[in-house]
Image (cartoon, helix red, strand yellow):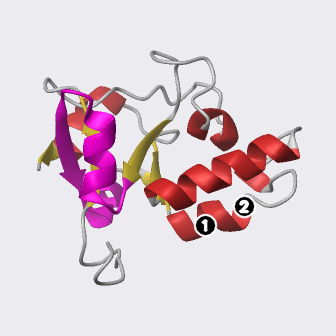
Amino acid sequence: MTEQKWKMSKHPLYRGDRKSGVSIPNPTADSSIVRHILFLEGPGRETPYLSTSEDYEAANNFADGGVVWETYVKTARAEGVTHISRTELLSLMKGNGKGKAKWENAFEVMQARRYVEQWNEHLLDFREVDKPEATARKIFKKS
């Protein structure tokens, strides 16, 4: 959001995706954050995360003929989804990455960090969710 600072308690997170609904994460898929952000393995890859953005325009860019969906951190958390904020992502992506963003190639970590900055990205982590399809449907609504 260019005019005011994004606040977790007040502002939605947006996701560009298909008209029929958001992609369904796989809680047991490879949990590398760098792999997810760099979109390694391309479309249809399994991932435990859903990327979201503070910015409607960024999400609309990824909608690619679909629609923009929205949710709130509070809504996602109430359903057992973990929110990984942009600030947390940026703090993890230094050097070869830290914690969930540990990666063998520092250049790729830096590239992932740039994307997080460019798109104001946040991740919704479904690794602890038992029913990801039902949960994703429940927490997102068309914007």
In the figure, 48 relative to 128: above or below? above
Cα separation, mark 1 vs mark 2, equals: 6 Å
Residue 101 seen in this snapshot: no
Residue 119 seen in this snapshot: yes
Q: Secondary structure at mark 2?
A: helix
- In depth, the one of 17 and 58 nearer the eye is 58
Amino acid carrying mark 1 in the image: Glu
Residue located beneath label 2 in the image: 92
Span shown in magenta? 53-78
Query: How many other residues sit within 10 Å of disc 2, few (<14), some (14-19) or many (≥20)?
Result: some
Q: Is 37 left or right of 120, judged from the image as shown?
A: right
At 36% from the left edge and 83% from the top edge, which residue is drawn? 5
Q: Residue furthest bottom?
A: 4
Q: Where residue 84 sits in the image (x, y, percent)?
A: 52, 58
At 31% from the left edge and 41% from the top edge, which residue is drawn? 61
Residue located beneath label 1 in the image: 88
At 63% from the left edge and 25% from the top edge, which residue is drawn? 40
Q: Is 68 left or right of 116, judged from the image as shown?
A: left
| The stretch drawn in magenta includes residue 59 | yes
Q: Where residue 130 sits in the image (x, y, percent)?
A: 40, 33
Give the quadrant of residue 1: bottom left
In the figure, 87 relative to 130: above or below? below
Amino acid carrying mark 2 in the image: Leu
Q: Secondary structure at mark 1?
A: helix
Q: Where residue 85 sits in the image (x, y, percent)?
A: 50, 64
